[in-house]
Image: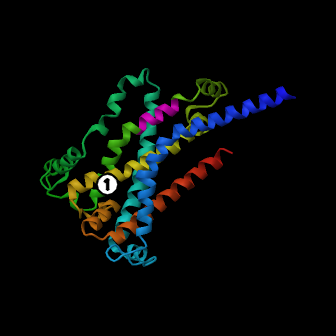
Amino acid sequence: MKLRRHWSCTLRNRRELRRAKRFLFLLPSLVGVSCFVLLPFGQVTVSSFFTVLTGKFVGLRNYGEVFQNAAFGLAAANTARFIAVGIPLLLAGSLGLALMIHGISKPDKYKYLYLLPMAVPAATMALVWKLLFSGQGFLNRILGTHVDFLGQGSAFFILVGSYIWKNLGYTMVLWLAGLKSISDGILDAAKVDGAGKVKSFFLITLPCLKGSLFTIFVVSLLNSFKAFREVWLVGGAYPQRDIYMLQNVFYNWYVNLEQDKLAAGAVISAVILGTVSLLLQRLWDSGDR
């Protein structure tokens, strides 16, 4: 009896020690996230209910001003449109290329070429935009026209194309990692059963890539907000209206010292992105059951 109690106590102590080690391992990250993310965001959330100059409590008035702001509505619509168009094209295009390269022997030999576009500075991309698509650019020289493609609706599609080009190789590498995790035995068994390439893709490959898809989608969503650098370098604080993004609104509010609307807009954006991420996580988790 005493021996059994001794072993139970020993096992309990080991479990507690493992938990303590896990907590200590995560502690530096938790401290960093708390100090540099959670606490500042909490302060921004609190300040969104007050006026910055007088410190007067105004409730939801700042949020009402943000929703009634025409510039915020335009920027939110453009950002949603950019995400809705750019991310599906990026995911589909990178997956197609990954499937093609996956069949090539030793694809990792050229992996540095896939990631090369991400190494191109944003200032270089902006210069290329101007050289190609300005009124006196190379495209107009070829077409014999004098159209400013960056000053009209085509600027949106130029931005989408730039986003896809810059992130295509990186996203493709993530797809390749997911494809490598699929056992060749499963695909060989499907071939023996008479399944063709298309049927094997939809019934075996695509379901096996479900975990990778969630990660790739979230990474692509975060990278979509980095397109603001090229937009700002090309069009400044007030670019063509089709590429006027949320970051432009926040930048202009910051420059104009409209901190009340800036705080409320930041909270709204964080809540929307957080809600989308949670819904996607719920969707993925429910599909695994």
Out of 134 and 223, give the one closest to the viewer: 223
Q: Which residues are magenta?
A: 171-179
Q: Position of residue 143 (x, y in %)?
A: 17, 50
Q: Quadrant of residue 198?
A: top right
Quadrant into which the N terminus falls: top right
Q: Position of residue 229 (x, y in %)?
A: 27, 52
Label 1: few (<14), some or many (≥20) within 10 Å? some
Magenta-colored stretch includes residue 76: no
* Residue found at the far front of this picture: 2
- Position of residue 219 relative to residue 53, above or below, is above
Identified at 46% across, 51% down, the residue is: 34
Total residue callouts: 1
Identified at 58% across, 24% down, the residue is: 184
Q: Secondary structure at mark 1?
A: helix
Quadrant into which the C terminus falls: top right
Q: Amino acid at mark 1?
A: Phe
Horizontal side of residue 182 vs 228, given as left or right: right
- Position of residue 19 relative to residue 105, above or below, is below
Magenta-colored stretch includes residue 175: yes
Q: Quadrant of residue 231?
A: bottom left
Residue 97 visible in rendering? no
Identified at 45% across, 61% down, the residue is: 42
Q: Main secondary structure of the magenta part?
A: helix
Residue 135 visible in rendering? yes
Horizontal side of residue 187 vs 160, given as left or right: right
Q: Position of residue 185 (x, y in %)?
A: 62, 23
Residue tagged by mark 1?
Answer: 157
